[in-house]
Image (cartoon, rainbow, N blue to C red):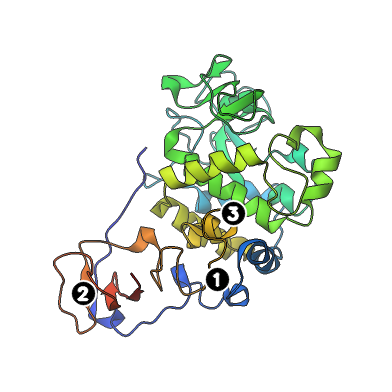
């Protein structure tokens, strides 16, 4: 299923709106203002760590809000053929011997990597997804990677399991579909940030996590994994699906994934912009009050309401999708 990129029209009532952080986050990220690199990661950790814990049973209901397709079915990112109906097709503890039969609760960051049923990680919705039971079981607790899929390939080659072909690791890995690689990359950026204080202990205690983590709070992710996830994130930008899901998770457990709110934020923490200070009113490309998924290139207006023929060509304050946007070239 292709990600949805809906166009939202501009209305007169929104002309005076001045949002602060993106996606109506207000001043949520203000405490991280001015931070760079490792210090920015720590500041974000302090903002997003505390949240309302869910029970494992709550997740079945939560998914009906966080992971619902436009047609009301389950949004599964592991299988390309599933067409699950909420509740009716959820895992009953038996079956799941063929793809498309049942969905279950997937820890995209496997729970064996942090000790099992340990809160708050065990039910943190930012890394929990409803996925095809068979494909999920095939993935097991293997890390994400790139592979030819010689061990297992889901229907139509949607996701794969096999020997890693990405430089730096040669073990068995699970490769999600290109359509969702950015989603999972930003999920892992969240986990490495939210739980940075726990990363060294996980690395020391659980062997299965060693290909993914480096044993430190910063960078946190192993060099090959970080390099690959940065590539995945750039190739598969934040979608409306992710933004909507982030908002839904916030409504339930009251914390956000900053890597969805600020596309390219990973560059300020681990990439080539670690010397750039974070501004919670801007994304990593210098567009303020919004993010890349909300910018509609066909709907740019001057501040007095005159429609432009395309994106702005010089610095200034503009309107896009009802929001004031400060463009810095």
Do residues under tags 1 and 3 come within 8 Å of each other at their CB atoms? no
Label 2 or label 3, whichever comes before in sequence order: 3
Q: Residues within 10 Å of mark 3 (few under 14, many from 20)?
A: many
Is 14 placed above or below 182 here? below
Identify the residue at image location x=55%, y=42%: 229
Q: Secondary structure under badge 1?
A: loop
Tell me if residue 88 can be seen.
yes
Is 309 placed above or below 79 here? below
Q: What is the CA distance from the residue labelled 1 to the residue labelled 3?
A: 13 Å
Q: Which mark is residue 59?
A: none
Is 49 placed above or below 179 here? below
Identify the residue at image location x=60%, y=61%: 252
Tell me if residue 115 can be seen.
no
Q: Position of residue 54 (x, y in %)?
A: 70, 55
Q: Is residue 305 left or right of residue 53?
A: left
Q: Secondary structure under badge 2?
A: strand
Q: Which residue is mark 3?
A: 270
Identify the residue at image location x=76%, y=32%: 208
Q: Residues within 10 Å of mark 2 (few under 14, many from 20)?
A: many
Q: Which mark is residue 277?
A: 1
Q: Which residue is mark 2?
A: 301
Q: What is the CA distance from the residue labelled 2 to the residue labelled 3?
A: 34 Å
Is 130 placed above or below 159 here? below
Q: Nearer the viewer, residue 262 or 127?
A: 262
Label 1 or label 3, whichever comes before in sequence order: 3
Q: Position of residue 232 (x, y in %)?
A: 48, 41
Which quadrant holds the N terminus? top left
Q: Nearer the viewer, residue 2 or 235?
A: 235
Q: Is residue 83 left or right of residue 43?
A: left
């Amino acid at each position: 299923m292709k990600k949805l990129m809906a166009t939202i029209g501009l209305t007169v009532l929104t002309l005076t709106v001045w949002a602060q952080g993106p996606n109506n986050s207000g001043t949520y990220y203000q405490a991280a203002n001015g931070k760079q690199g490792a210090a920015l990661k720590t500041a974000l950790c302090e903002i997003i760590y505390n949240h309302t814990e869910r029970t494992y049973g709550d997740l079945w209901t939560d998914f009906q809000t966080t992971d619902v397709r436009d047609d009301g079915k389950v949004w599964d990112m592991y299988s390309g053929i599933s067409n699950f109906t909420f509740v009716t097709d959820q895992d009953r503890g038996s079956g799941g011997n063929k793809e498309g039969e049942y969905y279950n609760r997937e820890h995209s960051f496997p729970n064996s990597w942090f000790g099992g049923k340990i809160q708050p990680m065990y039910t943190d919705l930012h890394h929990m997804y409803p996925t095809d039971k068979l494909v999920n079981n095939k993935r097991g607790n293997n890390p994400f990677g790139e592979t030819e899929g010689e061990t297992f390939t889901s229907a139509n080659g949607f996701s794969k399991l096999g020997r890693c072909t990405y430089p730096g690791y040669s073990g068995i890995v699970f490769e999600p579909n290109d359509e969702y690689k950015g989603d999972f990359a930003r999920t892992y950026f969240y986990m490495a940030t939210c739980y940075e204080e726990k990363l060294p202990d996980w690395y020391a205690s659980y062997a299965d996590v060693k290909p993914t983590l480096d044993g430190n709070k910063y960078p946190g992710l192993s060099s090959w994994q970080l390099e690959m996830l940065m590539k995945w994130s750039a190739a598969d930008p934040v979608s409306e699906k992710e933004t909507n899901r982030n908002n839904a998770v916030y409504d339930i457990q009251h914390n956000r994934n900053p890597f969805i709110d600020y596309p390219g934020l990973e560059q300020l923490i681990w990439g080539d912009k670690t010397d750039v200070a974070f501004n919670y009113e801007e994304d990593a490309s210098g567009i303020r009050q919004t993010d890349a998924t909300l910018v509609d290139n066909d709907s740019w207006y001057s501040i007095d309401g005159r429609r432009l023929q395309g994106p702005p060509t010089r610095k200034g304050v503009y309107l896009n999708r009802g929001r004031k946007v400060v463009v810095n070239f």
